[in-house]
Image (cartoon, rainbow, N blue to C red):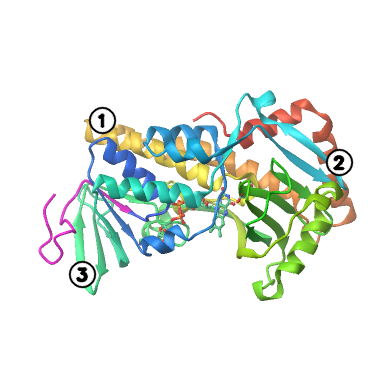
Amino acid sequence: MTANTSNPGIPRRTQVVIVGGGPAGLLLGQLLHRSGIEAVLLERRSRAYVLGRIRAGVLESGSVSILREAGVGDRLDQEGIPHDGCFLSFANKGFRVDFAGLAGRSVTVYGQTEITADLYAARSRSGATTVHGVEDVTLGDIDTASPHVSFVTESREHRIDCDIVAGCDGFHGVSRKSIPLDSMTQFERVYPFGWLGVLSETPPVSDELVYANHERGFALCSMRNPQLSRYYIQVGLAERLEDWPDARFWDELRRRIPAAAAAELVTGDSIEKSIAPLRSFVAEPMSWGRLFLAGDAAHIVPPTGAKGLNLAIADVRYLHEAIVGFFTGDPTVLDTYSDTALSRVWNAVRFSWWMTNTLHRYPDQTEFDQRMQETELAYLSGSTSAQRVLAENYTGLPL
Ligand code: FAS
Ligand code: PHB
């Protein structure tokens, strides 16, 4: 690594530049470090800002294994909550899908916030270079064998030459946009609703997640631990946070979940409240020259299937293997990364799309549409085969 005179902590050259310090970038950095490969990580926001984000909550069993292999599974094993099933409800009726019995595997509830904290702690221990507060990040010569990344930090310009650029900078990042549009195909569906999420220091209404289809709209009861609950209700795209005081949120949630659950609901002040839009998006291919996209930089799924974070982790596992192959004499394995990752991405995109369509109420939905949803859910409630399909996809298809 060649030191950079204007800022000794920032090298002029390294093997891999990772753009984005969310879960994808941090996990890739951790796996590469453990493989003896140098990677400089560039993050636009401060570490505190990234650690303050409240996002995903459910980990597939494959994701848990990968985090353990990365050496960041200790707290996850102590504090993560295994879930062997979940509930779905419609027309005030509910039924349980037995993940363990039907798919032979479970999921673990452990917040993305905690995963990011564990990964940042590991990165600090590794001593690898992380630059926060970067601006004007620009990828150069990514279609050659000598790519480089330029950026500004503390009003100084920097350039890092490297062998590989990992674009882990999320949907709004610069990496995907650095690929010529005529070299890429983008697939997208924007849903006509969003999720209003609340975090509250209250005991969860149920030991397992409850996904509710209701004619007023979707609702989800989740948690982070026995004293920290996470709830969501579907809202229209024009809804504003200021129109949703806590009391209104709790009243609406009670109306959408089964009466038995509503009777158990413990309400409290929200300690976080946000509205997230829902979209399905896939960019093909997930690589161009020496640039490789992972996580939300390449794809977005509606959170209904709890797939976003898990897809990011699976991408990183494949990309790590490909990069190790490149540096140990087998450059061809990088060529297969995009196809390998996309085959898993599309399965998750389909499942998340199906869960979203089955559980949400569309603004222009007719009574017939609502009856079709309820009929599908009624069939699901009585069919072990149909529940097995849901259980296999929800707990994560084999990596
Ligand atoms: P991220 O977006 O997490 O991280 C990208 C990082 O790149 C960010 O830290 C950003 O600051 C940085 N960055 C951006 N541009 C940059 C630049 N030019 N230079 C340097 N850095 C740059 N998934 C679920 O499974 N369940 C959920 O309930 C769920 N809820 C969500 C709610 C919201 C509001 C959002 C936005 C997403 C949610 N997701 C959920 C999906 C989410 O968990 C993502 O899948 C996950 O964060 C993906 O991780 P990354 O790919 O690392 O992207
Ligand atoms: C969450 O706990 O934040 C969560 C759980 C399951 C989902 C989406 C979000 O499908």
Nearer-N-terminus badge (1/3) = 3
The quarter holding residue 30 reads: top left
Q: Where is residue 240 in the image (x, y as percent from the top left)?
A: 66, 73
Nearer-N-terminus badge (1/2) = 1
Residue 387's disc number: none
Q: Residue at x 44, y 58 (%)?
A: 51
Determine whether the residue tagged by mark 2 lies in a helix, strand or loop.
Answer: helix
Badge 1: how crowded within 10 Å, few (<14), some, or many (20+)?
few
Say which residue label 2 marks.
375
Q: In this view, does 370 lie above or below 236?
A: above
Q: Label 2 vs label 3: CA separation?
A: 60 Å
Contact, mark 1 vs mark 3 (Cβ under 8 Å): no
Nearer to us of marks 1 and 2 is 2
> Can residue 289 be seen in this snapshot?
no
- Three-letter amino acid code at the position of disc 2: Thr
- Residue interval drawn in magenta: 1-18
Q: In this view, does 238 lie above or below 175?
A: below
Please state if 187 lies on the left or on the right of 163 as rendered: right
Could you tell me what secondary structure mostly forms the magenta stretch? loop
The reply to whether the residue tagged 1 has its Cβ within 8 angstroms of ligand 1 is no
Instruction: Judge by depth and name the residue closer to the eye, 199 or 321.
Output: 199
Query: Is 3 covered by the magenta stretch?
Result: yes
- Three-letter amino acid code at the position of disc 1: Asp
